[in-house]
Amino acid sequence: MIKILLVRHGETEWNKVGKMQGWGDSPLSELGRNQAQWLNERLKDVKIDKIYSSPTGRAYETSQIIRGYRDIEIIKHNDLREINVGKWEGLDKCIVESDYKEQNYNFWNKPHKYKATHGGEDFFEVRERVCNFINNIIEDKNNENKTILLVSHAITIKSFLCKLEGYEIEDFWREPLIGQTSLTEIDFSNDGYNMIIKGDTSHYK
């Protein structure tokens, strides 16, 4: 068996003001650091064997806070990055909505029809890269009986769950939401998988 812990980064300054992030970056807000610390406290007695993080600053800092006292290297991997939204990165969501009406609507309402005409990736491309990466971790015999923490982003995590649970990109935005520092815990074995918790934020204070 292998246990996978999927965690989204904490709140960022761009989250607070409604800017699109993607591969662009924004530092964690004070609340974001607190959210990560709350999760650190929740997981303080959990033995974690490996930590992988998106190289984006907001995810890497979140992973550092969660790691806490543990003497574990945090391995950065590009396949854990958020969806690349090209020219939208750093723009206010209201500007994207007004200047890119059709694709903004598709992004949030019809993701299977979303086309990255402004550069970046679509939802199918993100799903392929993140699933290939996580599946390689699961299938690696060296990871048997280990607990592996992956710190990433909302769409990246949703993409993996979409494939794992067998629903279509059309239904991508169905609940649950993947909130800031939400925890998703999944056990994998030869018999399949067991979803322990999904998108859980009960550590919030």
Image (spheres, rainbow, N blue to C red):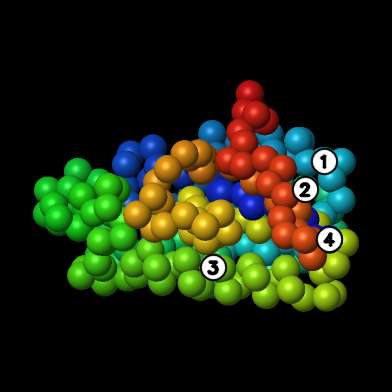
Residue at 62 percent across and 49 percent down: it is: 7
- Mark 3 or mark 4, which has the lower sequence index? 4
Mark 1 vs mark 2, foreground winner is 1
| Separation of residues labelled 3 and 2 (CA atoms) | 26 Å
Determine the secondary structure under disc 1.
loop
Residue at 46 percent across and 61 percent down: it is: 82
Mark 1 vs mark 4, foreground winner is 4
- The N terminus is located in which quarter? bottom right
Q: Which mark is residue 68?
A: 2
- Mark 1 or mark 2, which has the lower sequence index? 1
Give the residue number, with chain letter if any, for mark 3.
130
| Separation of residues labelled 3 and 1 (CA atoms) | 27 Å
Q: Are marks 1 and 2 in contact (CB under 8 Å)?
A: yes
Q: Residues within 10 Å of mark 3 (few under 14, many from 20)?
A: many
Give the residue number, with chain letter if any, for mark 1.
44
Residue at 46 percent across and 44 percent down: it is: 12
- The C terminus is located in which quarter? top right
Q: Is residue 21 left or right of residue 190?
A: left
Check disc 3 and give the amino acid type: Val
- Mark 3 or mark 2, which has the lower sequence index? 2
Check disc 2 and give the amino acid type: Gly
- Mark 2 or mark 4, which has the lower sequence index? 4
Q: Are marks 3 and 2 in contact (CB under 8 Å)?
A: no
Q: Which of the 4 image quadrants contains residue 74?
A: bottom right
Give x and y (percent) for residue 178: 51, 43
Between 47 and 163, the one nearer to me in the picture: 163
| Separation of residues labelled 2 and 4 (CA atoms) | 25 Å
| Separation of residues labelled 3 and 4 (CA atoms) | 20 Å
Residue 26 in view of the camera:
yes
Give the residue number, with chain letter if any, for mark 4.
1
Between 130 and 112, the one nearer to me in the picture: 112
Determine the secondary structure under disc 2.
loop
